[in-house]
């Protein structure tokens, strides 16, 4: 849910890029934590990174790693 919301927020409202980065980072961490292999989400991830600049990709990657580690101490269900 976070991935798709962040993607469309980035496309429709680029002025909210910081919020979309945070949502996308949380969504990406949750996606990795759940060991997702859904092709629709993989497409959204590729499209989001295609729109992002290198500094944004770097920031999203680091935030995702932070949230992934943070999720390691909680259960998803």
Image: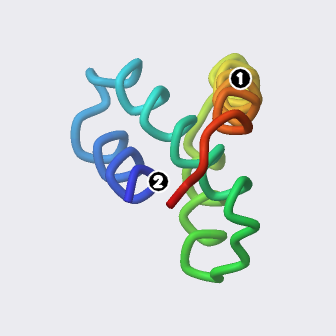
- Residue at 60% across, 49% down: 75
Local packing at callout 1 (Cα closer than 10 Å; few below 14, some 14-19, many 20+) is some
Q: Specify the quadrant of the image occupied by residue 61.
A: top right
Q: Where is residue 10 in the image (x, y as percent from the top left)?
A: 36, 40
Q: What element carries label 2?
A: helix
- Residue at 55% across, 55% down: 76
Q: In this view, does 53 lie above or below 27?
A: above
Query: Left of 28 or right of it: where is 57?
Result: right
Q: Where is residue 19 in the image (x, y as percent from the top left)?
A: 35, 24
Image quarter where the N terminus lies is bottom left
**Disc nearer the start of the sequence (2/1):** 2
Q: Where is residue 50 in the image (x, y as percent from the top left)?
A: 64, 49
Q: Which of 40 and 74 is in front in this view?
A: 74
Q: Mark 1 points at which residue?
A: 66
Q: Specify the quadrant of the image occupied by residue 12.
A: top left
Mark in front: 2 vs 1: 1
Q: Is residue 25 above or below residue 34?
A: above
Query: Left of 53 or right of it: where is 15?
Result: left
Q: Name the residue under label 2.
A: 3
Query: Left of 31 or right of it: where is 23?
Result: left
Local packing at callout 2 (Cα closer than 10 Å; few below 14, some 14-19, many 20+) is many
Residue 27 got which mark?
A: none
């Amino acid at each position: 849910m976070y991935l798709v919301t962040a993607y469309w927020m980035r496309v429709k409202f680029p002025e909210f890029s910081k919020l979309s980065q945070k949502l996308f980072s949380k969504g990406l961490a949750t996606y990795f934590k759940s060991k997702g292999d859904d092709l629709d989400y993989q497409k959204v991830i590729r499209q989001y990174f295609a729109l992002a600049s290198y500094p944004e990709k770097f920031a999203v990657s680091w935030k995702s790693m932070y949230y992934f580690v943070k999720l390691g101490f909680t259960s998803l269900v």
